[in-house]
Image: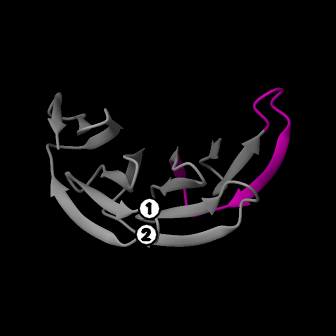
Amino acid sequence: MVNYNDGTVTKLRASDGLVLGTFAVGHSPYAVTFDGANIWVANSQDSTVTKLRASDGATLGTFATGKTPCGLAFDGANVWVTNYWGTNVTKLRASDGTNLGTFAVQNNPRSVAFDGASIWVVNDSSSTVSKL
């Protein structure tokens, strides 16, 4: 669970919601995704994404993205990040956070999903969806 106002995320036990830990990330965390071993957190006001080890919340890295990251998706090898004020998405290699490119989409990309073959991006201001 992201805690937008205090720069943390909280780990909850799925069976009963018990708080298992709260971990510091960047400024104004907005979204999370899971890559099978790690939690990725979009820090909307820092233009970064933080990678946390899911088992214990240890910070494994913080990686630069575009302006105002707010949506995340994992495609099996990479984490895709929507950059709301950047009209683009950033592709980060999940193993080490290396930036593999920035791809243009329409205005104000917010949400992103992976369907097994393509990345789909919802563009708020243009009321469109981009397929990558």
- Judge whether residue 16 is colored magenta: yes
Q: Report the span colored magenta.
A: 13-30
Q: Which residue is mark 2?
A: 97
Q: Mark 2 belongs to which amino acid?
A: Gly
Q: Position of residue 15 (x, y in %)?
A: 80, 27
Name the image quarter holding residue 48: bottom left
Q: Is residue 50 above or below residue 16?
A: below
Q: Position of residue 18 (x, y in %)?
A: 85, 35
Say which residue label 1 marks. 94
Mark 2, other Cα within 10 Å: few <14 / some 14–19 / many ≥20? some
Q: Amino acid at mark 1?
A: Ala
User: For this view, does 73 lie left or right of residue 13?
Assistant: left
- Distance, label 1 to label 2, CA atoms, is 5 Å
Q: Secondary structure at mark 2?
A: loop
Report the quarter where the C terminus lies: top left
Identified at 39% across, 55% down, the residue is: 77
* Residue 70 sits inside the magenta stretch: no
* Marks 1 & 2, CB-CB < 8 Å contact: yes
Q: Position of residue 60 (x, y in %)?
A: 60, 71
